[in-house]
Image (cartoon, grey):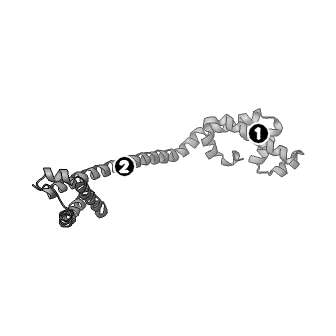
Amino acid sequence: MIQRMEMHEFDRLYGAYKPRFILIACSYLRDRSAAEDLVTDCFMHFWEKREEIVSTTENIPAYILGMVRHKCIDALRTRQQHLLTHQQIYQLEMRNIRENLAALEECDLAKILFRSEVEEIFHRRLAEMPELSAQIFIANRFENQTYQEIAQRYGISVRKVTREIQRCLKLLREDLGDYLPIAVLLFPHFLDK
C-alpha cells in the first residue's frame, strides 16, 4: 500500500486512466463533454483527498472508477428527474390544448344552444333603454350607420352618439354576464367599441 503520492505519480495515473474513464462515462451519459467534466471532477476529488485515499486503498484506479460510476449514476438520476418534470409539463400542456380544442370544436354547438338566450338579452336590454338610445344603437350596429350619420338623423352631436353607444355596450355586457364569450362569437360587431 502506498503511503504518499507525488505529483508525477498522479500525472502518470491521470494520463493512463483518464481516457479510459471518459469512454466508460460517455458510454452511459452519451455526452462526451459531460463525461470529460465528470471524470476530471473525480480526479480532482481524488487529488484533494489523496493522503486519506492512498493510505486506505490498494487499487487507486478501481477507487477512481468507483467514483466515476457513482457520479454517472447521480448524473443519470438528475437527468431522469429533469426529463420526468419536462414530461409532466408537456402532458399538462397537451391536456390544456386538447381541452381548448374540444371547447373550440363544441363552440358551434354552444352558438346554437345559446343563440336564443343571447338574442333575448339583446332584445330585452334594447326594450328597457330610452327610445333614443335604442334607436342610436340599432342604427349603428344593425343598419351600419356612422356616428356622423346618426347625429344628423336625430339632430344630436356626434359626442352624444358616442356616449349613448358606449352606455348601451356597457349595459349589454353587464346583462350578458356569463353569455358574453358566446355573444362575442355570435355577434362580434355588436359588442365592439
The count of marks equals 2
The mark lying in front, picked from 2 and 1, is 2
Q: Can residue 96 be seen in this view?
A: yes
Where residue 5 appears, as percent x and y from the top left, is 17, 59
Type of amino acid under label 1: Arg
In this view, 7 is above or below 125: below
**Is 45 in front, or is 108?**
45
Tell me the residue that label 1 is attached to.
167
Where residue 76 appears, as percent x and y from the top left, is 27, 52
Tell me the residue that label 2 is attached to.
87
User: Image quadrant of residue 180?
Assistant: top right
Q: What element carries label 1?
A: helix
Type of amino acid under label 2: Gln
At a point 31% along the width and 63% down the height, the residue shown is: 33
Q: Choose the circle earlier in sequence order: 2 or 1.
A: 2
Q: In this view, does 21 lie to the left or right of 112?
A: left
